[in-house]
Image (cartoon, helix red, strand yellow):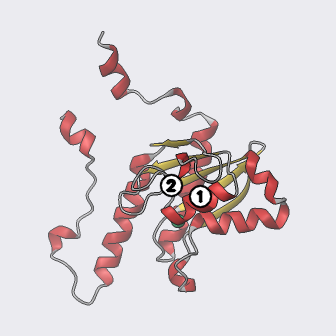
């Protein structure tokens, strides 16, 4: 059997549905779902310390009219109410969308242990999507990033949000742009 074909179609073991990583990302997705219900860009996250969720966050920029209220910042603030800043060095972040440049930088300053994300952030990503702040060695130490865990679920949350937003717009775009796209590039190419 062709080894490379095999690898491209199966996910790494840490992504297995019964792994702890999958469980934590499911909780992050639940936060994203909650954001969607309140008309926020559906991004959710949890912080995991000693294998336990100690804080969670969802995007809150619309309600607060504050562009820095990203899920990551909210979760960090919650954790810092109960733990010293140093605890973040032993903490992992699970977030549905790759952290943006701002959050990637904050996570670095707090010395997050590692970051797991769902889908990449092609427009604002700070951990490989646009910039690679996580691996930059100039200021704070780098942190490892693992992407692709529940990627499709994270993308579907965003797609549902953009459709919902467009339907509320004064001049909605043509109907064909409002249908929920449930296809993914890799599936299209595989079929
Ligand atoms: Zn951010």
Which mark, residue 11? none
Secondary structure at badge 2 equals strand
Please tell me how crowded label 2 is: few (under 14), some (14-19), or many (20+) other residues with Cα within 10 Å.
Answer: many
Q: Quadrant of the N terminus?
A: top left
Residue 39 in the image: state x and y as whole percent: 46, 77
Between 111 and 87, the residue placed more toward the observer is 111
Between 70 and 152, the residue placed more toward the observer is 70
Residue 9 lies left or right of residue 70; in this view the side is left
Residue 121 in the image: state x and y as whole percent: 40, 57
The mark tally for this picture is 2
Residue 21 in the image: state x and y as whole percent: 60, 40
Name the residue tied to disc 2.
96
Residue visible at 15% across and 76% down?
Answer: 174
Residue 59 lies left or right of residue 110; in this view the side is left
Residue 171 lies left or right of residue 49; in this view the side is left
Q: Is label 2's Cβ within 8 Å of ligand 1? A: no
The answer to whether residue 52 shows anywhere in this view is no
Residue visible at 76% across and 62% down?
Answer: 79
Please tell me how crowded label 1 is: few (under 14), some (14-19), or many (20+) other residues with Cα within 10 Å.
Answer: many
Between 52 and 33, the residue placed more toward the observer is 52
Residue 171 in the image: state x and y as whole percent: 21, 87
Residue 64: quarter of image: bottom right
The answer to whether residue 136 shows anywhere in this view is yes
Residue extending farthest to the top is 1
> In the figure, 22 relative to 156: above or below?
above
Between 140 and 122, the residue placed more toward the observer is 140
Q: Quadrant of the C terminus?
A: top left
Name the residue tied to disc 1.
45
Residue 6: quarter of image: top left
> In the figure, 49 relative to 70: above or below?
above
Residue visible at 47% across and 51% down?
Answer: 132
């Amino acid at each position: 059997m062709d080894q490379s074909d095999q690898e491209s179609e199966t996910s790494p073991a840490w992504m297995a549905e019964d792994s702890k990583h999958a469980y934590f990302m499911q909780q992050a997705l639940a936060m994203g779902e909650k954001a969607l219900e309140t008309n926020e860009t559906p991004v959710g996250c949890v912080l995991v310390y000693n294998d336990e969720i100690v804080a969670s966050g969802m995007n809150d920029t619309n309600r607060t009219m504050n562009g820095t209220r990203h899920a990551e910042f909210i979760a960090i603030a919650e954790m810092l109410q109960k733990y010293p800043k140093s605890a973040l060095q032993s903490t992992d972040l699970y977030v549905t969308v790759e952290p943006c440049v701002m959050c990637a930088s904050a996570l670095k300053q707090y010395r997050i242990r590692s970051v797991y994300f769902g889908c990449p952030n092609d427009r604002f990503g700070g951990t490989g999507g646009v910039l690679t702040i996580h691996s930059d060695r100039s200021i704070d130490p780098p942190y490892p990033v693992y992407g692709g865990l529940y990627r499709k679920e994270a993308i579907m949350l965003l797609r549902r949000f953009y459709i919902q937003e467009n339907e509320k717009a004064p001049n909605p775009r043509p109907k064909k742009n409002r249908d929920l796209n449930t296809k993914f590039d890799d599936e299209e190419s595989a079929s």
